[in-house]
Every structure is written in C-alpha cells, then in structure tokens.
Image (spheres, grey):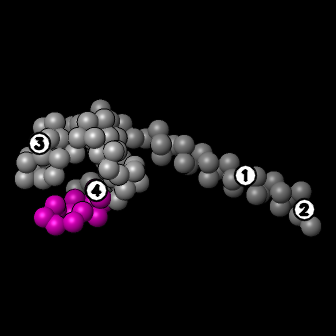
Amino acid sequence: MITSKQHLLIRTLILLSLASLISVAKAADPAKGIVTFNNICAACHGAKGEGGIGLPLKNILSRFQHNEVIEKIKNPKPPMPALYPSFLNEEAVADVAAFIETL
C-alpha cells in the first residue's frame, strides 16, 4: 500500500514533469527562430524556405511531425551540416523549428 508521503511524492513528480513539458513548449519562439534561420539556414534553404542548395522547408508540417522537424535539425543527413550542439543549442533548435513550421 502507498503511504501518504509516497503519494505526495508521486504527485509532486508528476506535476514537475508536466511543468517542465509546458515550459519547453513555451520556450519555442519563432521570432527568435527567424533571426537564427536568416543567419544560418537561409543561405541554403532560401530566405522564405523555398529551397535552393538545401531542401524546401515550406509546409514542412505537411510532411513531418514537430518532433521529426526537431530531430532533422539536430541530426541532419548530409549534405546538411551538423549544427547542433556546436552552433545551435536546445533553445535555438526549438526556435528555428517553431519558425520554419510557420512557413
């Protein structure tokens, strides 16, 4: 049987887990993402995500789910360079994903 202390601990852990998920979701800022995109990504993917050297990114959510977009930024396939974690941190990845998902 679970004691009241164990029950309280379990509830606290669940609430903390949910709070961390909510804070991650709130952290993604497309306004910051556009700055990073323009500085790092636009040269290959086009200023409006239309493609060029890199693949087009417009309507990316019609092809991939959000978690897949994050994964592709973090672990790209060549010829796209690996920018995470050397140039992009977790927050920058989330911001860029949030921006390109608006294209």
Residue 9: % across, % down: 77, 57
Q: Nearer the viewer, mark 3 or mark 2?
A: 3
Task: State the SS at label 3.
Answer: loop
- Is residue 60 magenta-colored? no
> Within 10 angstroms of label 3, few (less than 14), some, or many (20 or more) residues?
some
Query: How far apart, in angstroms, are the residues tagged by discs 2 and 4?
Result: 45 Å
Residue named by callout 4: 73
Q: Residue furthest front?
A: 62
Residue named by callout 2: 3
Query: How far apart, in angstroms, are the residues tagged by discs 2 and 1?
Result: 14 Å
Residue plotted at (7% across, 48% down): 52
Query: How far apart, in angstroms, are the residues tagged by discs 3 and 2?
Result: 59 Å
> Within 10 angstroms of label 4, few (less than 14), some, or many (20 or more) residues?
some
Mark 3 belongs to which amino acid? Answer: Gly
Mark 1 belongs to which amino acid? Answer: Thr
- Which comes sooner in the sequence, label 3 or label 1? 1
- Which comes sooner in the sequence, label 1 or label 4? 1
Quadrant occupied by the N terminus:
bottom right
Residue named by callout 3: 46
Which stretch appears magenta?
72-86
Residue named by callout 1: 12
